[in-house]
Amino acid sequence: MSTGTSTFVIRWINFLTMILAIAVICFGVWMSTHHDECRKSLTLPVMGLGALILIISLIGFLGALKNITVLLWMYLIMLFLVLVAILVFTVLAFIVTNNGSGHHVSGQRYKEYQLQDYHSWFLVQLNNTKNWRRLKSCLVKSKNCDDLPKKYKTLKEYKSANLNPIEAGCCRPPSECGYPPKNASYYDLSFHPLSSNRDCKLYKNARSSKCYNCDSCKAGVAQYMKTEWRVVAIFNVVLFVILSAVYFVACCARRNAARSSSDKVRGR
């Protein structure tokens, strides 16, 4: 690849990623002013990611613009570390999300989830009291359970609903308990549970309680996290391929810059 072509490509790629980085930082600032504590917890990682992209892009842009070999070397090293980090995270994400799947409930469209089916990493994170207290607070604020009566106005609609993992695990007792539903948000708890599952005794009809302390709720969250992580892992594979191509072009730009500097020295 010629000197002009490689430096031109690197300049424009890094110019565009600088704009993207500024947008990410602005989004992080917006999140920091949001009243939702669940979103606020993501502020620092988002802003940190934006700052990292901005620094790397700025170094690459200046290196390609001025043909400065040192900056291009720094850009290559930092880009290589990013590629390694993406690769490691992606491999770990696929390993962690390899276990766990829902169990079909007889006569129902939705699935129920069991915590022990998931990877030990999920078990450690979700069984941590501090972590779960924060997650539970977010679940209550999300109003997933409160919105069920609005989505399913009749008992027949509710019984035939295809509930998502959070709704199936956190908003209702496990089916094995045998509690008859009165509507989408209320179960008759006067019946003696048919199962010894501790979740049967933990479930309450109160809006702030529901089954938020149940293992079935933690399993629902684990399934949700698994799905999200899989999406991120697939995105990372695409990102890894793109950044690898950028890395190759940057190598050409660095080599051409070094050759150009060498030619100038000889010309003297």
Image (tube, rainbow, N blue to C red):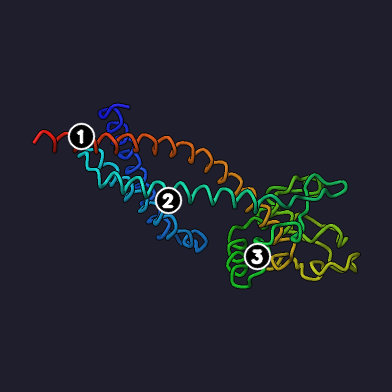
Tell me the quarter of the picture where residue 118 sits.
bottom right
Q: Residue at x 38, y 51 (%)?
A: 50
Q: Who's the residue at 63% across and 73% down the image? A: 129
Q: Amino acid at mark 2?
A: Leu
Does dot 1 land on a helix, a strand or a loop?
helix
Crowd tier of the residue under label 2, counting other residues whose Cα lies within 10 Å: few below 14, some 14–19, many 20 or above: few
How many angstroms separate mark 3 from mark 2 (CA)? Answer: 30 Å
Where disc 3 sits, the SS reads helix
In the image, residue 236 lies at what x, y percent? 52, 43
Q: Are marks 1 and 3 in contact (CB under 8 Å)?
A: no
User: Residue 218 appears at what percent x and percent y?
Assistant: 69, 62
The residue under the point 88% across, 60% down is 178
Question: Number of marks in the image?
Answer: 3
- Which is nearer the N-term, disc 1 or disc 3? 3
Judge whether 223 appears above or below 241 on screen.
below
> Considering only order in the chain, which callout, 2 or 3, is on the residue closer to the N terminus?
2
Which of 167 and 68 lies nearest the eye of the viewer?
Answer: 68
Q: Position of residue 25 (x, y in %)?
A: 36, 52
For the residue pair 3 and 195, the one nearer the viewer reads as 3
Q: Does dot 2 land on a helix, a strand or a loop?
A: helix
Q: What residue would you read off at disc 3?
A: 126
Q: Give the left or right position of residue 17, taking residue 230 as reference.
A: left
Q: Amino acid at mark 1?
A: Ser
Give the residue type that dot 3 points to: Leu
Could you tell me residue 95's position as x and y percent? 65, 51
Check disc 1 and report the residue beneath it: 260
Q: CA distance from mark 1 to mark 3?
A: 56 Å
Q: Nearer the viewer's eye, disc 1 or disc 3?
A: 1
**Earlier residue among tags 1 and 2:** 2
Judge from the rendering whether residue 36 lies leftward or rightward of residue 260; answer left or right: right
Q: With respect to residue 81, does 136 lie above or below?
A: below
Mark 2, residue position: 81
